[in-house]
Image: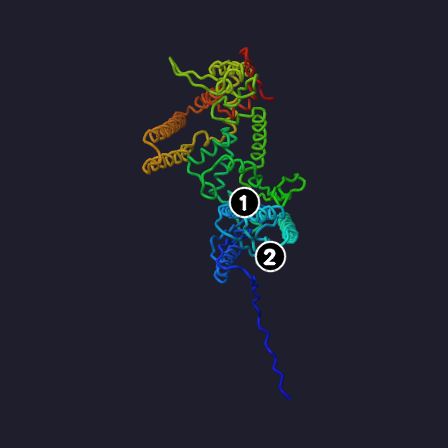
Amino acid sequence: MRKKTRLAAVPLTVILIVIGEEGNMRIAAYCRVSTDSEQQLDSLENQKAFFTEYAQKNGHELAALYADRGTSGTSLRRRTEFQRLMRDAERGLFEMVVVKDISRFARNTVDFLQSIRRLKALKIDTLFLTANMKSLGESEFVLTVFSAMAQEESANLSKRVRFGKKVNAKKGRVPQCVFGYDRLDNFTLAVNPEEAETVREIYRLYLEEGLGSWSVAGRLNAEGRLTKYRQEWDSRGVRRILENPLYCGVLVNHKYEVEDYLTGRSVRLPEGENFVHERPEWAVVTREQFGRVQCELARRRKGERQSADSRHSGKHLFSTLIKCESCGRSFTRKRYTYANTRIFWKCSTNESYPSERCGNRVTVDEGELLQALREWARQVAGDWEGFVQSIVAEARRQLPEQQVFDPDAGGGKRKRLESKKQRWQEMYANDLISLDELKARIGAIQRELEELERENTAGKAQGSDGDEETVCRERVEDFLSFKTMKNAGLRKIVDYISVDQDGNVRVYLCKA
């Protein structure tokens, strides 16, 4: 009796060969991966190698290989390589498009059929290897069924991804990269001291100096402060810092949700659907500061909506405070230097466009407006002398004696100014700016340094002569006379100022 021999199972590699395919065709291969992860990019390289080998084995000429990375198959909008393939098809660069799977070509049935029809009109065939299907040989119904299956698979994948994100958001997952913090793991952040200081400076400039987001960005760039990605700041980046409650120790997740997986369109969710996590140890600014910023953002947005072409500015004392009653836009500042220097404010519409856009030609003398405010301040104070003395006494009571004058108070500002001066000099050395611009920049910095030195000298004199009360009194009087007041300070007193065509100037004061 013959002995039976047991055969060992051998793994099989199945290769589908398209029989009857003509050789020597110029083909284009298309591949895609949906994320930029290392594994997906490895997959992309494997797809490229596969198509190169396929062309060699079947005697084709690989005319071009198109590869989209980090893009979804549900929309053609961001698939630049796919769009290039379609343009090259119209130029006749190849005779057939080879794709490994229908899902790689498109996961949107409408996009799939439109692209296939466009290629068929150009007499260009499309071969899907895993299904062993060709667009010119199969009915459109069969292709539609396979495309619909790919779209349904994408829909299910989108649901799973959304569910996973929602679970992590509920647990308190932190952002991948957020300025002011270092990410320790998926659920833990650590405050970055250097970046946190920049965040505090942004809040200070916005609240105390009344600067707009563009001006804040310009100040940060001039001081050499960079974003997390070592880029210069812009208005959008500044506003993200100002609007993010994370900086006051509140992590808010699940704020947006994808409404349509085909277009990728997101919608903002109601606050009741957000997941809020208290993280006081991550606070960089106080809750009170953050709340004040939100109120200021809302106030400025309201002003911008009322005047479509304007935006907030705190550069000058009356910036965006003087409004035209005729058109609603802010007045703009004009400086005249004939016999002597005078500052006027004019309607920005009337200044920029012909008079038919706005008939308000009134010019407001800044000096006269300031004088009116000074007289009002004295009337409110009643006994001016006693009023000033009470403020001086209150300031001295609240401030510790050692804080009346701090010889190192301007040290940080002095260092920043010196650093700015050095950077401008380096830019000139590298031919990035002209000599005239260098002189202008250095001159401005030098004037700031001289002013800082004068303040320092005055402070020392105050400390040595024991004349603290006199210096403090002078500063209070200067402030109440609007000599040293800034835009942010004036906004706490004046809501807005309206000017009509008859020259009537109405000052609307803030409620006490």
- Point out which mark residue 78 bears: 1
Residue furthest to the right: 272
Q: Amino acid at mark 2?
A: Met
Q: With 125 as the anchor, is 429 left or right in this view?
A: left
Residue at 48% x, 24% y: name it. Answer: 486
Q: Can residue 167 be spotted in the picture?
A: no
Q: Judging from the image, what secondary structure is the residue with disc 1 in?
A: loop
Q: Which residue in the protein does label 2 denote?
A: 133
Q: Which quadrant of the figure contains the N terminus?
A: bottom right
Q: Between residue 182 and residue 343, name the one nearer to us.
A: 343
Which amino acid, mark 1?
A: Arg
- Quadrant position of the C terminus in the picture: top right
Say if 500 sits above or below 57 in the image.
Answer: above
In the image, farthest residue toward the top? 502
Task: Find the distance from the CA under tag 2 to the CA under tag 1.
Answer: 26 Å
- Quarter of the image holding residue 2? bottom right
* Rendered location of residue 58, percent (x, y): 50, 61
Please state the horizontal and vertical placement of residue 465, each as a whole percent of the image.
39, 25
Indicate which disc, 2 or 1, sits on the residue closer to the N terminus: 1
Badge number at residue 465: none
The residue drawn where x is 47% and y is 52% is 64
